[in-house]
Amino acid sequence: MKAVVFDNELKLVNDYKKPEPKEGEALVRVTLAGICNTDYEITKGYMGYVGILGHEAVGVVEDVNSSDKSLVGKRVVPEISYGCKKPDCDYCAEKLYRHCPERHTLGIFHKDGVFAQYFTMPTEVLFEVPENVPDEQAVFVEPLAAALEITEQLHIKPMDKVVVLGDGKLGLITALALNAENIDVTLVGKHQNKLDIAKNQGVKTSLLNDFKVEKKYEVVVEATGSVSGFETALALTKPRGVLVLKSTVAASKELNLAPIVIDEITVLGSRCGQFPPALRLLKSQKVDFSPLISATYPVDKAIEAFEKNKEKDTLKVLLKF
Ligand SMILES: [Zn+2]
Ligand SMILES: [Zn+2]
């Protein structure tokens, strides 16, 4: 089968061995997949991963290795990881599979990813896509679930004012998701064209230059991935407020953390989320991610697609199978 593989370099392999589902797993034929920044980071050596890339996909179940074949023929999205399920694993015992230290993560850790004609996953981490949700929306379920994770971790009160800082994919998806949950959210960024995507769907937006930086927001979501973004986010958080970190601020510049103490700010790390609420939101059609699609490439042009993904103004690049 065709597969996009990273092994010191990114390559398209035409004769990769088709996977066979283990007991309890399904074989899924991929129809559409999305390139994520994590995939790009892996091509720069992140996680030391070797194998098929990708963790955002929609596909159709072709076979299930179990007596229960009810998923066969269904359109599904895979959650990104599954736990070791060993009897002595405390995390798996509490169903915290996403924190299991020995978890398998699609295209990132100990598990071939979805940038291939087929992948396998345990059936319990495959979710059926509602009929009214096209592939082009369903392919956003993983970042959408990550955005909604904030609402699982934090009680945002009806009168709370929320700022999402950063108008890249992550910031846009987070702002659209919170707005659809009827939360008072303002998206702040540097690119009018990107802000307009959110604005057109009813989100309050502002260019950073026009935005008054003052400590008056109960919740601030950092989605810029830069140290200066972190500092601005901190300067926007009201005393006793919550600063949500959605991006891994990898830079090593010195940071002044004193305001966190002085203003008694809670810093909350937030990563991946549950799929069922994300699928429900997609089904409601209160969010539309199609304006975030910058380009769609056939799998044969996967290398070009990765090049496109690197370009500065690109939002989501999709791979069609
Ligand atoms: Zn992703
Ligand atoms: Zn485990």
Image (cartoon, grey):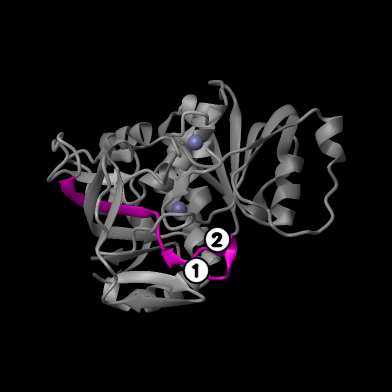
Label 1 belongs to which residue? 313
Residue 31: image quadrant is: bottom left
Q: Which mark is residue 257?
A: none
Is 49 contained in the magenta span?
yes
Residue 121 appears left or right of 29: right
Residue 225 appears left or right of 110: right
Mark nearer the viewer, 1 or 2:
1
| Alpha carbon distance from label 1 to label 2 | 9 Å
Q: Which mark is residue 191?
A: 2
Image quarter of the N terminus: bottom left
Residue 320 lies, in percent from the top left, at: 26, 65
How many labels sit on residues?
2
Residue placed furthest toward the front: 87
Task: Read off the magenta span.
Answer: 43-64
Mark 1–mark 2 CB contact (< 8 Å): yes
Q: Is residue 199 visible?
A: no
Image quarter of the C terminus: bottom left
Residue 130 lies, in percent from the top left, at: 21, 38
Residue 155 appears left or right of 27: right
Amino acid marked by disc 2: His
User: Does the closest atom of ligand 1 sit within 8 Å of the Cβ of label 2?
Assistant: no
Amino acid marked by disc 1: Asp
Residue found 52% across the figure and 56% down from its top: 168
Q: Is residue 31 visible?
A: yes
Q: Is residue 185 above or below residue 138?
A: above
Residue 39 lies, in percent from the top left, at: 48, 63
Q: Is residue 147 above or below residue 50?
A: above
